[in-house]
Image (cartoon, rainbow, N blue to C red):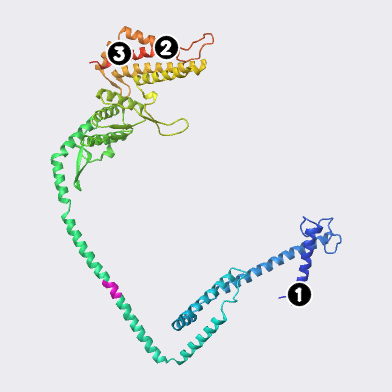
């Protein structure tokens, strides 16, 4: 603890040092740190040159001042924190004050409310002090009139308390406590009485529900439905399932009765004649399990009388080529009775579906969903992409393309015209190749299923020498128009005339119709 003189001296030195700091930073050495101890600098206190010792002393003294100032700041912060804790710990509403206000409320309710408001203002000021608000003040919290009224009320209460008979007060207090207990018991009984009435009502309602539940029990209905199903339906379903399974080359499989539930009999696929009972999931491969699921689906479809549409998403994934052909044939047969929608990215399966629909004389509608080059998804087209189209469809598309070329070619350059007609001729050659590979040879040998149809071998015998010569001429001509190799700089190739393209397209259509007649005639 410093003496008053020491504190005064310290204050004067600090004031002198801070004045020197202000002078140095604002006037003498603007922009330089204080104290400036450069070689050319002078002491701002005595204006003398600074030798090394003086520069060291000034630097040490500044460090001392800064350290001492920081210590004082920390001490002041700790004193402030302690003071705030003491302020926050003030109990603004002790129990004796609460009791006094409650007693006062019996005599003067308005005055008790004023006392509560005064205590609330006091609490507000305490909180303001704790939050370091500079305007916090206890002045004008209590008016002289209110203070006088509270003092008068306090005096009256003290007088009454001094005149009270302790034994009489205890007797009255015990009486009040007894009455209170009786009232609480009556209240509890009242609440319990309502609860008992509610429980009685709930139990009566439950009895009625149990009786109604017994009257509507579906167990007898389930037993009878299962019995009728086993006698009249199960055998038909089992036979249909066996038929569908055999078509997909699944042998020794049947439907196993697994009991009834809620009026319905359930079945699941199981093996016949096995020494041990193995589940189909363990024995069958992934492709066979897919075929098994299709067999069950086809069985369910066969007994569905709604004739509503069915939708399949890639139904032949993991199936071998033989089963794919069988599935296509089965779907074409179903399509004779109801709409069948198939989503698939398998072009070979698309070809199988088209051929199966043609054989079954079922209507075959093409739709395609594609992704555009810019990444846009879900773009719908009315036709299949070029790679999945039949020769007939390709010729139809080429006819539309030729109409577009005739419409727009007047504004094209010679090079653009040659490019467009060359591309068109290339697609026409692809259509001829599709006709040979699928429309003719595909009727004898199906590459998607590796099946050979010997009875269709007669198609080759119906193709005449003139048919062959016409094809060779058409293919040679269109191949000359299509750009497949680098054009020679020594030959000036001329793009075909539109009339030539139309004539050749009509000739190809006529030739393909004749070939189709060969394949369809019996």
Q: Residues within 10 Å of mark 3 (few under 14, many from 20)?
A: few
The spot of residue 496 in percent (x, y) is 45, 12
* Viewer-nearest of discs 1 and 2: 2
Magenta stretch containing residue 238, yes or no?
A: no
In front here: 398 or 271? 398
Q: Residues within 10 Å of mark 1 (few under 14, many from 20)?
A: few
Q: CA distance from mark 1 to mark 2?
A: 121 Å
Q: Is residue 249 left or right of residue 159?
A: left
Where the C terminus falls, by quadrant?
Answer: top left
Disc 3 is placed on an element classified as helix
Q: CA distance from mark 2 to mark 3?
A: 23 Å
Figure check: 117 above or below 425: below
Write the start and end of the magenta stretch as one range.
188-193
State the residue position of label 1.
Answer: 6
The spot of residue 289 in percent (x, y) is 29, 36
Who comes first in sequence, dot 2 or dot 3?
2
Residue 274 appears in view = no
């Amino acid at each position: 603890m410093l003496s008053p003189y020491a504190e005064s001296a310290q204050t004067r030195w600090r004031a002198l040092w801070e004045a020197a700091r202000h002078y140095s930073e604002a006037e003498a050495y603007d922009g330089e740190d204080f104290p400036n101890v450069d070689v050319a600098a002078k002491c701002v206190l005595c204006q003398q040159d600074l030798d090394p010792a003086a520069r060291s002393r000034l630097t040490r003294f500044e460090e001392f001042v800064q350290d001492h100032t920081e210590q004082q700041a920390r001490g002041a912060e700790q004193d402030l924190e302690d003071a705030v804790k003491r302020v926050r710990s003030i109990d603004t509403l002790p129990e004796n004050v609460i009791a006094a206000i409650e007693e006062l409320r019996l005599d003067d309710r308005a005055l008790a409310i004023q006392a509560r408001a005064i205590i609330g203002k006091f609490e507000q000021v305490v909180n303001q002090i704790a939050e370091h608000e500079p305007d916090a003040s206890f002045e004008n919290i209590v008016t002289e009139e209110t203070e006088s009224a509270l003092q008068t009320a306090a005096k009256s209460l003290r007088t009454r308390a001094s005149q009270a008979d302790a034994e009489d007060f205890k007797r009255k207090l015990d009486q009040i406590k007894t009455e209170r207990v009786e009232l609480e018991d009556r209240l509890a009984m009242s609440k319990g009485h309502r609860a008992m009435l509610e429980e009685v009502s709930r139990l009566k309602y439950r009895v009625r529900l149990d009786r109604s539940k017994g009257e509507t029990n579906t167990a007898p209905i389930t037993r009878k439905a299962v019995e009728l199903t086993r006698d009249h339906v199960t055998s038909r379903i089992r036979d249909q399932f066996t038929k569908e399974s055999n078509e997909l080359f699944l042998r020794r499989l049947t439907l196993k009765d697994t009991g009834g539930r809620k009026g319905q009999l359930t079945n699941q696929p199981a093996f016949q004649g096995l020494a041990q009972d193995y589940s189909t999931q363990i024995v069958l491969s992934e492709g066979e399990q897919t075929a098994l699921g299709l067999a069950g689906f086809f069985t369910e479809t066969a007994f569905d009388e709604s004739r509503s549409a069915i939708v399949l998403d890639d139904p032949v994934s993991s199936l071998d080529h033989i089963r794919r052909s069988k599935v296509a044939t089965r779907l074409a047969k179903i399509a004779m009775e109801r709409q069948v929608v198939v989503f698939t990215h398998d072009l070979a399966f698309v070809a199988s579906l088209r051929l199966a629909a043609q054989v079954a004389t079922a209507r075959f509608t093409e739709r395609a969903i594609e992704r555009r080059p810019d990444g846009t998804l879900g773009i719908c087209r009315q036709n299949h992409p070029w790679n999945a189209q039949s020769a007939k469809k390709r010729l139809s598309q080429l006819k539309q393309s030729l109409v577009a070329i005739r419409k727009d070619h007047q504004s094209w350059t010679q090079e653009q015209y040659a490019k467009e007609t060359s591309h068109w001729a290339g697609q026409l050659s692809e259509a001829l190749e599709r006709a040979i590979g699928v429309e003719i040879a595909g009727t004898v040998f199906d590459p998607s299923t590796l099946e050979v149809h010997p009875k269709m071998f007669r198609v080759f015998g119906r193709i005449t020498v003139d048919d062959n010569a016409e094809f060779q001429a058409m293919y040679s001509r269109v191949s000359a128009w299509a750009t497949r190799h680098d054009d020679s700089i020594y030959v000036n190739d001329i793009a075909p005339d539109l009339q030539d393209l139309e004539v050749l397209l009509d000739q190809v259509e006529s030739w393909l119709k004749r070939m189709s007649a060969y394949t369809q005639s019996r």
